[in-house]
Amino acid sequence: MSELSILKIYDAEELEILINSLEKKFGNLEYEDSKNLLKFPTNPSISIRLPFDFKYDQKKLNHSNFLIIIIHSGEAALAYSEESQIVEHKMIKAYMVRQKQGKSQIKHLKTKGKSKAGSRVRLAGTDHFSEEINEKIAEWDEYFEIGKIAISCNKTLQPFLFNRPDAALKKNDVRMFKIPKHIQEANFENLSFIHNYLISMELKFDDSDKELINNLISTIDND
């Protein structure tokens, strides 16, 4: 059997209709907090990845404000989302890439272990880059009530984000979720695309349940 999926933006009322209808059909559901995922033990092929702006607690949907953090070498795209809208965003760039080789100075030093004048300038840029990111995250985290943090960050850059003495985020922050998509560049276009993906409900099912799911979705859409 092939796995199918539907990606849609639903409000709380529509989501509750979907969840309640599937629960009536397949019995009690389970919530996997780490993936914001609803599953049905009697039919494991069906699952609902809830929109990132909702959390499921005590069998109820509650709104959750969230951050998006996308970090590549030399560029970062950050956003704060509230009620399914990007309220604030910030683009950050830094001088971190070696022009001839086209790779970040951090990766170069890991393989070569040398530091010349140009390298030190690039590393200073890296530190300022991570400082700007950290300051913006800390500012939003203090001012807004943030329930979740969606992040995509190159492993090489993670120490510069998490290991700072004044780090706004810790690597074990329970609010953090890895964005389950490859992101080519940290720019506003991709930031908006990822935001739309995150606020969408993703329903996965086998083709054997296709008719049931399509009928249910049609009923919700036509109400």
Image (cartoon, rainbow, N blue to C red):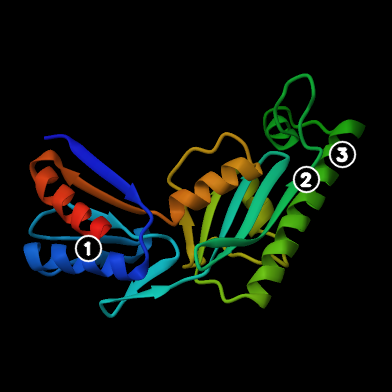
Of circles 3 and 2, which is in front? 2
Give percent across and percent down for residue 125.
83, 44
Q: Which residue is mark 2?
A: 126
**Callouts 3 and 2 close, C-beta under 8 Å:** no
Give the farthest residue toward the bottom.
58
Q: Quadrant of residue 221?
A: bottom left
Q: Which residue is mark 1?
A: 18
Residue shown at the point (85%, 45%) measured from the top left: 124
Q: Secondary structure at mark 1?
A: helix
The quadrant the C terminus occupies is bottom left
**Callouts 2 and 1 close, C-beta under 8 Å:** no
Q: In the image, is residue 124 above or below residue 147?
A: above
The three-letter code of the residue at mark 2 reads Thr
User: Does residue 154 appear in the picture of this structure?
Assistant: no
> What label sits on residue 127 in the rendered view?
none
Give percent across and percent down for residue 183.
54, 38
Give percent across and percent down for residue 173.
52, 66
Residue shown at the point (39%, 60%) measured from the top left: 51
Give percent across and percent down for residue 7.
34, 47
The three-letter code of the residue at mark 3 reads Arg
Q: Secondary structure at mark 3?
A: helix
The quadrant the N terminus occupies is top left
